[in-house]
Amino acid sequence: MIVTVVSVPDGGMTTVSVPEARRRLGTDPFLFLRVELPEQEREREREGEEPEEESVVRLLGLADEELEWFGRRGESARAEFLGEVAGFVVPVVHDRAVAHVHVLAGERFLVVVHWGPATLAADITEQLRRERPRDAVATLFLLLQESLATFRRASVRALLAVEELEDDMFEGRRPEQIYLLSQQRRWSALLHHALLPYLQAVEEVVTRRMMSPDFPAERQRLAQEFQRTARLVLADIESLQDAARRAFASYGSLVAGEQNGVINRLAIVSVIFLPLSFLTGFFGMNFTFLTNRLETRDEFWLLAVGLQLVAVIASLFLLHRSRIWRRLRDDD
């Protein structure tokens, strides 16, 4: 476990030991800790270290039976207040995937637990340098806002990709486009599925806290700003879903249009060859008139070939005057 202390005024970071972090949690007026846990316990075994059996809250001296979920993998989105401490499981978009970050906030500290490389380290550090929040609660809302920003950036990139695919389809339809659209549609569903339960949990907790008469006005403003941003991000993801559905509908319309063109061409061929088939079948029958009267070569060419030419010319003339021919000419 790697524990990093982040300096709020300047955004600097210092790696400390677990005992030092535990000591500073009890003495510092405001402490922002970022805890990095290994991706798998096997990594610690390869380094010759024993896997940690204690939970993160116990190692940091924040032991609480209601916080046993903190730092445990596989937890779903969560937002709850436990007296003077608030705990969150925050979804974050990172490398085309949704990861979960555990956040524990009190009046004097903010602890963030993540697995592997820091998902929000660079963005949060830059925000701390720029915003310089006064306390842990302001830093908490800054972190929550940044998690929403990752969803917004991901949804905007995906929306632009869907629109580019839709434009490419009208220039030339290709089979791989439907596969790319399926990926974007699945990605939009994943974003929505990850964000919606989290927003519902946070909305319930924040609204309940805002209704309390002792909730400070400054924190009410931060909560309202978070709620407004959350609604905008959710609207962006829903716009992405609508765009993906529209692109699928456009693809289906293009396929239907191409199929209609093929059917119209088959209809033209049928109209041309139907009279020819009739004449061939008619003169192929052995009845008295054909066997006894049509004896010369001139009569054969006149009826067998002349009638066929007249039928073809008449069919082409009728098709040329019809809307089907004009529609095919316009499509070409």
Image: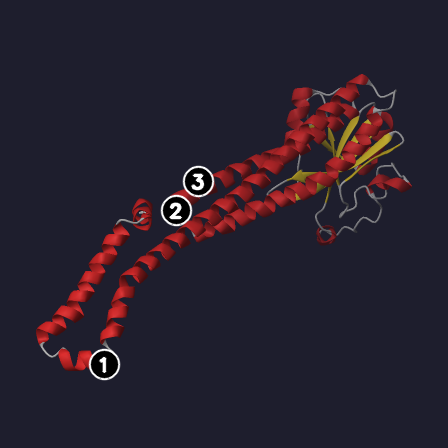
Residue that appears at 78% across and 18% down: 218
The quarter in which the N terminus is drawn is top right
Q: Is residue 30 left or right of residue 191?
A: right
Sequence order check: which comes first, mark 2 or mark 1? 2
Q: What amino acid is at disc 3?
A: Asp
Residue 184, by quadrant, is top right
Q: Which residue is mark 3?
A: 167
- Mark nearest the camera among 2 and 1 is 1
Q: Residue 134, image x and y in percent?
A: 76, 19
Q: Is residue 34 left or right of residue 253?
A: right
Depth order, front residue of 198/282: 282
Badge 1 element: loop
Q: Which residue is mark 1?
A: 287
Task: Answer whether labels 2 and 1 touch (C-beta < 8 Å).
Answer: no
- Above or below residue 303? Residue 184 is above
- Above or below residue 139? Residue 161 is below
Residue 35 visible here: no
The CA distance from mark 2 to mark 3 is 9 Å
Sequence order check: which comes first, mark 2 or mark 3? 3
